[in-house]
Amino acid sequence: MNKDRLNQLLGMLEDDPKDSFLRYAVAKEYENGQLNQEALEEYLTIKKNDPDYVGMYYHLAKLYEKLENVDLAIQTYTEGINVAKRLSDFHALSELNSAKMNLEMEM
């Protein structure tokens, strides 16, 4: 984790707390530093404030996988698939479907 980058992102986020991209970048920095709980909180904030931020679903589900919460991972993939369908985001839809199918095959 790059602490300088994280601090810079957190400062920018203070100025615009509803910026989903900045919050996503903060979550990724936390993940890079193995601060999984902090990353989870950031992803869940995005999900609450901006549920159409489709890119978050894949990474949130992957974090749930890392935390060994398969049920929440599958639920999150499914939610993301529904959002991607509604938004006609076929790239995200493909990635989410593939990740969900891979996880289900591992069970």
Image (cartoon, grey):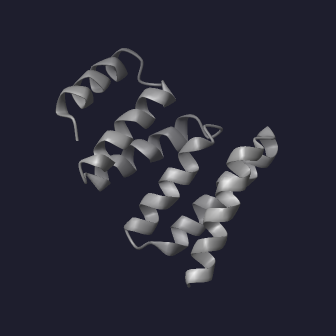
Q: In the rendered view of the protein, which quadrant contains the N terminus? A: top left
Question: Above or below — where is 36 with respect to 45?
Answer: below
Left or right position of 100 against 33: right
User: In the displayed structure, does residue 36 sit left or right of residue 105?
Assistant: left
Quarter of the rendering containing residue 90:
top right
The image quadrant where one finds the C terminus is bottom right
Residue at 45 percent of width and 41 percent of height: 45
Q: Residue at x 25, y 54 (%)?
A: 34
Residue furthest bottom as drawn: 107
Q: Is residue 15 above or below residue 37?
A: above
In this rendered view, identify the residue nearer to me: 43 or 107. Answer: 107
- Pinpoint residue 102: horizontal percent, then vertical percent: 61, 72
Q: Quadrant of residue 51?
A: top right
> What percent of the width, then of the height, locates residue 33?
23, 48
Seen at 66% across and 71% down, the residue is: 101
Left or right of 101 in this view: 82: right
Question: Of all residues shown, which one is farthest toward the left?
Answer: 3
Q: How many marks?
A: 0
Residue 32 spot, x, y in % from top left: 29, 47
| Residue 54 x %, y % | 63, 42
Picture quadrant of residue 22: top left
